[in-house]
Image (cartoon, rainbow, N blue to C red):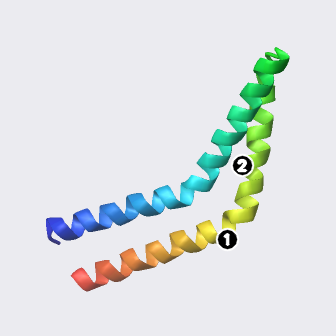
Amino acid sequence: MTPEVALEMVREMLATAGLVSSPILGTALVVGMLVSIFQVVTQIQEMTLTFVPKMLSIIGIIFIFGTWMLSTIVFYTEGVFRRIVELM
């Protein structure tokens, strides 16, 4: 395995990880900001108020995008295994 091949595999791994995690992270960011704005406006300082909406939205996003996330990870993993066989 040459360094170029290893770097390419690491680049693909990081790109796939970013692509798969972006819906969850983006949703958590948006919901967290909205809840924080709501807390500032209403002056409610309850810690569970930030946790529950984030968890519910993340669970919803996993149900919506779960099949796409899984198929993307499986496609990447199959590609890695094919490359390992080709390199040997």
Q: Which dot marks residue 58?
A: 2
- Judged from this view, the residue extending furthest toward the left is 2
Q: Quadrant of residue 10?
A: bottom left
Quick one: 77 or 42, which is closer to the camera?
42
Q: Distance between the residues labelled 2 and 1?
A: 14 Å
N-terminal of the pair, mark 2 or mark 1, is 2
Residue, x 75% and y 42% (percent of image)?
55
Would residue 54 be found to the left or right of residue 25 on screen? Answer: right
Count neighbours of disc 2 (C-alpha within 10 A) and say few if under 14, some if 14 to 19, many if 20 or more: some
The answer to whether residue 24 of the structure is visible from this angle is yes
Would residue 60 be found to the left or right of residue 24 on screen? Answer: right
Q: Quadrant of the N terminus?
A: bottom left
Quick one: 44 or 48, which is closer to the camera?
44
x, y percent for residue 71: 58, 74
SS category of the residue bearing label 1: helix
Amino acid type for the residue under numbered disc 2: Ile
Would residue 75 be found to the left or right of residue 62 on screen? Answer: left
- Residue 39, placed above or below residue 8: above
Q: Which dot marks residue 67?
A: 1
x, y percent for residue 26: 61, 47
- Judged from this view, the residue extending furthest toward the front is 41
- Judged from this view, the residue extending furthest toward the bottom is 86
The answer to whether residue 88 of the structure is visible from this angle is no
Q: Which dot marks residue 54?
A: none
x, y percent for residue 72: 54, 71
Q: Quadrant of the C terminus?
A: bottom left
